[in-house]
C-alpha cells in the first residue's frame, strides 16, 4: 500500500474516533467562541440568584444594563482594534476629551446641542484617526501609539477643560438625553442602553456579514497573507482605529447622560475595563478571532460579578480580588477550548 | 537606536541648561525688587475639583507674594511616585518651600530629603502620618467634617429610624480622607465605630445616640471613586439591596450628585450629606439635592501656606499649629438651609460667598 | 503602569540577528525618559503639559527608532 493511502486512512480513522463528552463540549465551544463567556454568565446569574434575593429582579436587571452601557460601548471599539491584533490604551482618554469638548462648547447656552455633539464626536473620530495614522503611516506598534496618545489626549482634555466639571443643568437637553429613562415591564432602561445596543447591532452585522468585516479578521489573523491576497491592510487598519474613535465619542454622549455631568475624571479605569470585557468575551489578543457578541457578554459578566457581590454585601477589597480571578478563569477556559484537536 | 538616543540626549541636556539658567535669573515680578521665592504646590491629582481649586487659588495669589509657583501633582490618587518626583524636582530647582497634600506615607522619605536640603514643607488638607513629617500642616479636619454631617443628620432625623447608605471613595486603596469622613459621620450620628481607621466594620444594625436617638440600619458601603458616574453606580447598588434608604453619606459632592441621579431615576428621595463646600455643592444645598455639606477651604489652605513659606524664606517667623491641635485648622463649616438644633451651621447664601470652584 | 511600560517601549526588544540596541537598552531608555521628565520638571512646567510632553516623547522616540532601522536596512 502507498503511504498516501495509509495517511488518508489514518486521517479518516482519526476523524471517526470516539470523542469523550468533554472533548465534544470543547469542540462545540471552539466553533463558537462566545459560548464559553455565555456559559460563565449563566453560571454567575445562577450563583447570585441562589445567594441573594435582590439580584434577579426586574429592577436590578435594568440597573445592571445601565451600569454596563458605557464600558460595553467602549468595548466595541476595543474589539475592532484587538481583532486586528492591536490594542487601544487611549480609549478612556478619547472618551473624556470628546465629553469635555461637547460639554464646554454647549455650556450655558453656548453652541446648540446638536452642533456641540457633532463636534465632540468629530474630535473623537479624529483622535482615533490619529492613532490609525501613526500605526499605518509610521508603522508604530499600536501599544506604543496608544500609550503615547493616552497621555496626549488626557493632557489636552485637562488643559482644555481647566480640570473643571460641568453639571447637567448647564448643558442642553440633547446632551443629557441618553440619560432619560423609560420602563418596559419592570425593567428601567435608558436611551443610552438603546444606543449601545444599536452600536452592537450595526458593528456586529458589519463584522459578520460584510467584506469589510472579513478583511478586519484577515488583517488580524495574518497580515502578510492578507496583503498578498489583495486585502487593503493599511486602509482597513486606519478605518478600524477611526471607527473606534467614533464609537468612543458616542460612548462619551452616553456617559454624560449617565453621570449627569461632564467630568475629566470619569471612569478612571476605562481602558482596563474595556480590554477585560473583550478578553473575557473570547476575542483573542493575537487578533483574527472572536465575535462581537462575546464582548457584550464579557462586559456583562464583569458588571454582574460586581453587582452580585455588592448585593451579597461582600467587602470592597474582596470584590477587586474576585474580578481578577474572574479574568484569569475566563482566559484559562478560553485557552483550553482553543487546544481542541481538529 | 543609539543615534536616536544621542540626539534626544543632546536636546535634553541643552534644554536642561536653558531651564537652569532661567531658574536662577530673577524675574522682574511684583513688589520688593527682591528675587521671587520658588514654591511648588503638589496636589494628589489635577482632576479632583478640590485640588483644581487649590491650584487655581495658589496661582492667582503667587504674584502677590512675589512667589514663582510651580504646580505639580500625581497622576491620580495613589500615585506616590508622581509626588516624589515633584519633590525631587523642587529640590533640584532650588525652591524654598513645598506645599503638598501628601498622598500617603510613601512620600515621607522624599519630604525628609527636602527638609534636609533646607526647604520648608507645609502639608495641606491632609496631615501626614506622623504629623511631624512636615514643618507644619494647614488642614481641614476631615473627621470633624464628617462629625458635623452626622450630628446634623441625627438631629434632623428626630428619633426616626435611619436606613443608611455609606458612599465611600475607593475600593482598592485606603486613604485617610476616606475613613476620616466616613467614621467621623458615624461618630457624629452616635454609632459605635469599631476600628476608627477602617470603613465598613461597624455593626449593621443597632441604635444611634445622636439627636433623639433611634434605630439604624447600615445598608451598604460602596465606593464611588469620588465622581458622579461612580456615585450613581454605588447608589444604585445600595438601592437594589434596600429601596428604603432615607440617609446617604457621600464622601464628596460629585458623589452626592451621582447618588441623587440614582435616587431620582428610582423615584425615591433621601437625605444626602456630603463634604467639600465647592460652589456647585453649595448650589446643591440651595436646590435641596444635598441636605447639608461640610465646607472646607482649599484656597485658604494654599494661599495661607504660600504666604507662610514666603515669610519664612525671607527670614520671618515660622507658623505655629493651633492650640490643642497638631495642625493649623483652616476651618470647616456646615452649610445647610435646614439648621438643626445643637449644630452650628451657615446658610447656603453665606456658603456661596466663600465657596470655591465653579 | 505608564512609567515602567515607557521604559520597556523605548528599550525595545532585540530584533532577530541585529543587536542594534547597545549594551543595555532598558537602562539607556530608562535614563532617557527620566532625563526628559527632569528637564520638563525643572523648567517649572505645569503638570498637564508634562503629561502631554511625555506622550509626544514616546511616539517621537519610537518613530525615530523605526526610521533609523529603515535607514540601516
Image (cartoon, coloured by chain):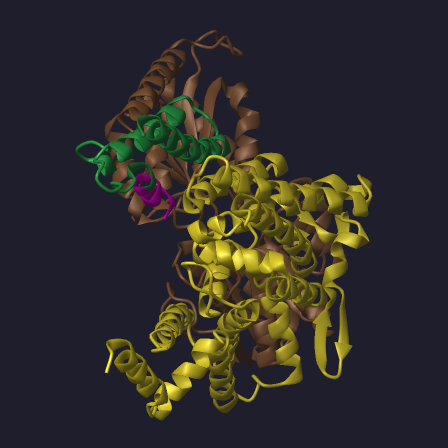
Chain colours: A yellow, B brown, C green
Q: In which quarter of the image is the C terminus of chain A?
A: bottom left
Range of residues picked out in magenta: C1-8
Would you identify the image quadrant in which residue C23 lies? top left
Please, is residue B35 above or below residue B237 in the view?
above
Residue A155 among those drawn in magenta: no
Residue B59 is at least partly visible in this image: yes
Instruction: Decide which of B129, A321 is in the foreground and name it.
Output: A321
Please, is residue A17 above or below residue B112 in the view?
below
Q: In terms of secondary structure, what is the magenta stretch mainly?
A: helix
Locate residue A174 relative to residue B260 in the image: left or right: right
Percent across and percent down for residue C17 are 21, 39
Please, is residue A147 above or below residue B15 in the view?
below
Would you identify the image quadrant in which residue B315 lies? top left
Please, is residue B325 above or below residue A222 in the view?
above
Instruction: Decide which of B304, B99 is in the foreground and name it.
Output: B99
Q: In which quarter of the image is the N terminus of chain A?
A: bottom left
Percent across and percent down for residue A139 are 44, 38
Q: Which residue is drawn at 42% across and 67% down?
A: B199
Would you identify the image quadrant in which residue B37 lies? top left
Residue C4 among those drawn in magenta: yes
Locate residue C44 relative to residue A232 in the image: left or right: left
Percent across and percent down for residue A9 are 30, 84
Residue B281 is at least partly visible in this image: no
Instruction: Decide which of A168, B155 is in the foreground and name it.
Output: A168
Amino acid at each position: 500500500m502507498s503511504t498516501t493511502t495509509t495517511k488518508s486512512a489514518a486521517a479518516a480513522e482519526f476523524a471517526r474516533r470516539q470523542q469523550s463528552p468533554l472533548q465534544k463540549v470543547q469542540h462545540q465551544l471552539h466553533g463558537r467562541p462566545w459560548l464559553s463567556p455565555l456559559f460563565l454568565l449563566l453560571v454567575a446569574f445562577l450563583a447570585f440568584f441562589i445567594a441573594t434575593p435582590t439580584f434577579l429582579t426586574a429592577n436590578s436587571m435594568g440597573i445592571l444594563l445601565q451600569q454596563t452601557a458605557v464600558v460595553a460601548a467602549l468595548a466595541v471599539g476595543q474589539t475592532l482594534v484587538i481583532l486586528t491584533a492591536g490594542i487601544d490604551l487611549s480609549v478612556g482618554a478619547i472618551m473624556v476629551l470628546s465629553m469635555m469638548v461637547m460639554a464646554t462648547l454647549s455650556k450655558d447656552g453656548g453652541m446648540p446641542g446638536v452642533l456641540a455633539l457633532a463636534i465632540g464626536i468629530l474630535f473623537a473620530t479624529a483622535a482615533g484617526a490619529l492613532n490609525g495614522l501613526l500605526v499605518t503611516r509610521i508603522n508604530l506598534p499600536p501599544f506604543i501609539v496608544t500609550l503615547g496618545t493616552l497621555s496626549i489626549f488626557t493632557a489636552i482634555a485637562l488643559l482644555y477643560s481647566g480640570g473643571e466639571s460641568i453639571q447637567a443643568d448647564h448643558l442642553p437637553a440633547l446632551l443629557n438625553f441618553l440619560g432619560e429613562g423609560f420602563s418596559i415591564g419592570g425593567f428601567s432602561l435608558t436611551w443610552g442602553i438603546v444606543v449601545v445596543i444599536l452600536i452592537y447591532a450595526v458593528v456586529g452585522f458589519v463584522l459578520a456579514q460584510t467584506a469589510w468585516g472579513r478583511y478586519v479578521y484577515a488583517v488580524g489573523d495574518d497580515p502578510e497573507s492578507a496583503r498578498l491576497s489583495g486585502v487593503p491592510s493599511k486602509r482597513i487598519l486606519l478605518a478600524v482605529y477611526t471607527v473606534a474613535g467614533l464609537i468612543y465619542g458616542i460612548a462619551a454622549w452616553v456617559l454624560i447622560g449617565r453621570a449627569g455631568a461632564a467630568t475629566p475624571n470619569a471612569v478612571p479605569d476605562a481602558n482596563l475595563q474595556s480590554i477585560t470585557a473583550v478578553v473575557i468575551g473570547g476575542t483573542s489578543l493575537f487578533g483574527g478571532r472572536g465575535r462581537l457578541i462575546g464582548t457584550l457578554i464579557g462586559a456583562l459578566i464583569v458588571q454582574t460579578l460586581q453587582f452580585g457581590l455588592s448585593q451579597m454585601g461582600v467587602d470592597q477589597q474582596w470584590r477587586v480580588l474576585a474580578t481578577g480571578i474572574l479574568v484569569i478563569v475566563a482566559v484559562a477556559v478560553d485557552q483550553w477550548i482553543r487546544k481542541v484537536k481538529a | 537606536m543609539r543615534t536616536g538616543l544621542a540626539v534626544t540626549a543632546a536636546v535634553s541636556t541643552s534644554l536642561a541648561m536653558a531651564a537652569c539658567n532661567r531658574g536662577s535669573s530673577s524675574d522682574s515680578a511684583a513688589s520688593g525688587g527682591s528675587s521671587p521665592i520658588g514654591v511648588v504646590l503638589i496636589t494628589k491629582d489635577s482632576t479632583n475639583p478640590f485640588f483644581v481649586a487649590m491650584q487655581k487659588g495658589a496661582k492667582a495669589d503667587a504674584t502677590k507674594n512675589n512667589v514663582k509657583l510651580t504646580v505639580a501633582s500625581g497622576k491620580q490618587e495613589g500615585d506616590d511616585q508622581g509626588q516624589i518626583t515633584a519633590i525631587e524636582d523642587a529640590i533640584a530647582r532650588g525652591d524654598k518651600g513645598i506645599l503638598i497634600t501628601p498622598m500617603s506615607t510613601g512620600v515621607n522619605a522624599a519630604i525628609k530629603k527636602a527638609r534636609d536640603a533646607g526647604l520648608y514643607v507645609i502639608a495641606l488638607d491632609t496631615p501626614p502620618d506622623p504629623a511631624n513629617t512636615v514643618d507644619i500642616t494647614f488642614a481641614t479636619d476631615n473627621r470633624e467634617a464628617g462629625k458635623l454631617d452626622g450630628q446634623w443628620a441625627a438631629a434632623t432625623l428626630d428619633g426616626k429610624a435611619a436606613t443608611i447608605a455609606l458612599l465611600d471613595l475607593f475600593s482598592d486603596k485606603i486613604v485617610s480622607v476616606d475613613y476620616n469622613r466616613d467614621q467621623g459621620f458615624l461618630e457624629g450620628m452616635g454609632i459605635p465605630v469599631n476600628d476608627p481607621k477602617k470603613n465598613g466594620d461597624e455593626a449593621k444594625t443597632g441604635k444611634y445616640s445622636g439627636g433623639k436617638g433611634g434605630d439604624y440600619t447600615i445598608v451598604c458601603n460602596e465606593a464611588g471613586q469620588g465622581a458622579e458616574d461612580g456615585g450613581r453606580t454605588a447608589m444604585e447598588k445600595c438601592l437594589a439591596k434596600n429601596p428604603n434608604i432615607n440617609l446617604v453619606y457621600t464622601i464628596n459632592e460629585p458623589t452626592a450628585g451621582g447618588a441623587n441621579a440614582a435616587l431620582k431615576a428610582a423615584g425615591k428621595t433621601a437625605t444626602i450629606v456630603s463634604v467639600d463646600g465647592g460652589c456647585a455643592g453649595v448650589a446643591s444645598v440651595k436646590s435641596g439635592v444635598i441636605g447639608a455639606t461640610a465646607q472646607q477651604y482649599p484656597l485658604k489652605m494654599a494661599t495661607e501656606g504660600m504666604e507662610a513659606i514666603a515669610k519664612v524664606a525671607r527670614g520671618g517667623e515660622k507658623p505655629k499649629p493651633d492650640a490643642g491641635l497638631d495642625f493649623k485648622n483652616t476651618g470647616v463649616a456646615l452649610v445647610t438651609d435646614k439648621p438643626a438644633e445643637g449644630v452650628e451651621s451657615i446658610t447656603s447664601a453665606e456658603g456661596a460667598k466663600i465657596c470655591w470652584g465653579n | 503602569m505608564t512609567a515602567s511600560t515607557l521604559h520597556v517601549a523605548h528599550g525595545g526588544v532585540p530584533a532577530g540577528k541585529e543587536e542594534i540596541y547597545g549594551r543595555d537598552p532598558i537602562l539607556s531608555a530608562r535614563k532617557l525618559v527620566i532625563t526628559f521628565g527632569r528637564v520638563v520638571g525643572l523648567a517649572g512646567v505645569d503638570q498637564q503639559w508634562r503629561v502631554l510632553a511625555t506622550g509626544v516623547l514616546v511616539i517621537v522616540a519610537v518613530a525615530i527608532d523605526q526610521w533609523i532601522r529603515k535607514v540601516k536596512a
